[in-house]
Amino acid sequence: MEIFLNNVFTAFTQVVILFLVAMVGFVCHKAGIYTEKASRLTTNLLFYIVAPAIIIRSFYGMEYNPSALKGLVMALIGGIFLHLVGIVIIPFLFNKGDKATACIFKYACVYGNVGYMALPLAQAVLGDEGIFYCSVILVPFNILSFTHGVSIMQKGDNAEKFNLKKLIVNPGVIGVAIGLPIFLLQIKLPEIIYSPVSYIADLNTPLAMVMFGTYLASADWKTLFSDKRIFVSALVKVIIVPLVTIFSLKLFGFGGTLLTACALSASAPTASNTVMFAAKYNRDTALASKVTAFISVLSILTMPVMIALAQSIQ
């Protein structure tokens, strides 16, 4: 029990640290220094530049050997599985009510902050091995969020015509296409190339969290209880998906740091992509902000518990 509580406290501390960074954006929004409107201008920077840089750097940092390759494959399977849990559930949810906003709730149930929320936590709780696995999980996240996720956001009134080419040729897939050969062939990039990529990747956590803080500040908390779909989304994202992931992967033979990394990624709160995609595809960004903000605040309590649970059943 003591170990479980220590794990909860460690994870809780790291979650709070990230939210303190987000509070900078919150205060800046209230002060008019950096508002939600201004933060939306950074969406494309995160979307097209920072995301692939993260993937490329994560692959570049992996040492190729049989054990690493096995871990890579297992983490990929775990990453695909934890997203499939949500993907399988959402067709049965949010079929009543406003169909134009249903896409936001469905996206929020499946896709979490496996980048700037999971990776810093992995560093603090699991070390380099945890970062390795969580970086691999970014691969299915990016591929699925830029394909299945985009298709969700495109459905409904005023949706763009489905374009397979746009779904395949996207930052997530491009990042994998560059990073995977680097890992497999152990290509050593010259410092003059690697350093800029690394610096750009470093923008992810602070920039995304500050931007997220502006969404917290602009979210209409007074109307939070007016739509029960927000609470259904939260239940699925931070409780059902991680619990199913943890116990299912345990049955499949996952354990140790790998299981905890998968649990950490599965329990991450709704991705800020929910708001970015809502803006990009002309959805209700105010609702997306509110859903993301509520689930993220709730995850301060649920995420540490899920991480500690995965560690306690090894």
Image (tube, rainbow, N blue to C red):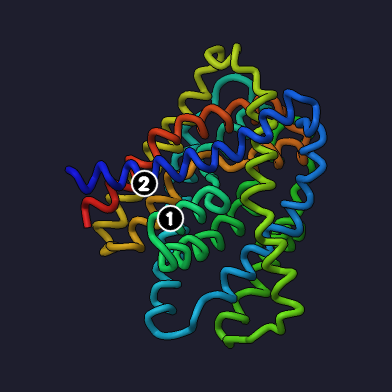
Amino acid at pointer 2: Thr
Question: Where's residue 120, x and y in %?
Answer: 51, 53
Instruction: Residue 10: give its label.
Output: 2
Is the residue marked by circle 2 packed among few (<14), some (14-19), or many (20+) residues within 10 Å?
A: some
Question: Where's residue 258, x and y in %?
Answer: 36, 63
Image point 72% across, 60% down: which residue?
Answer: 170
Report whether 66 appears left or right of 40. left
The residue that mark 1 highlights is: 124
**Disc on the earlier residue, 1 or 2:** 2
Image point 50% across, 30% down: which residue?
Answer: 297
Image point 59% across, 19% down: which residue?
Answer: 97
The quarter holding residue 48 reads bottom right
The quarter holding residue 289 reads top right
Is the residue marked by circle 1 packed among few (<14), some (14-19), or many (20+) residues within 10 Å?
A: some
Q: Does residue 42 lie above or below 213 as drawn? A: below
In this view, the residue in front, 5 or 73, is 5
Question: Where's residue 53, x and y in %?
Answer: 68, 65
Report whether 246 appears left or right of 14. left
In the rendered image, the quadrant that contains the N terminus is top left
Amino acid at pointer 1: Ala
- Badge 2 marks a residue whose secondary structure is helix
Question: Where's residue 217, x and y in %?
Answer: 66, 25
In the rendered image, the quadrant that contains the C terminus is bottom left
- Badge 1 marks a residue whose secondary structure is helix
In this view, the residue in front, 311 or 110, is 311
Mark 1 and mark 2 residues within 8 Å of each other at the beta carbon: yes
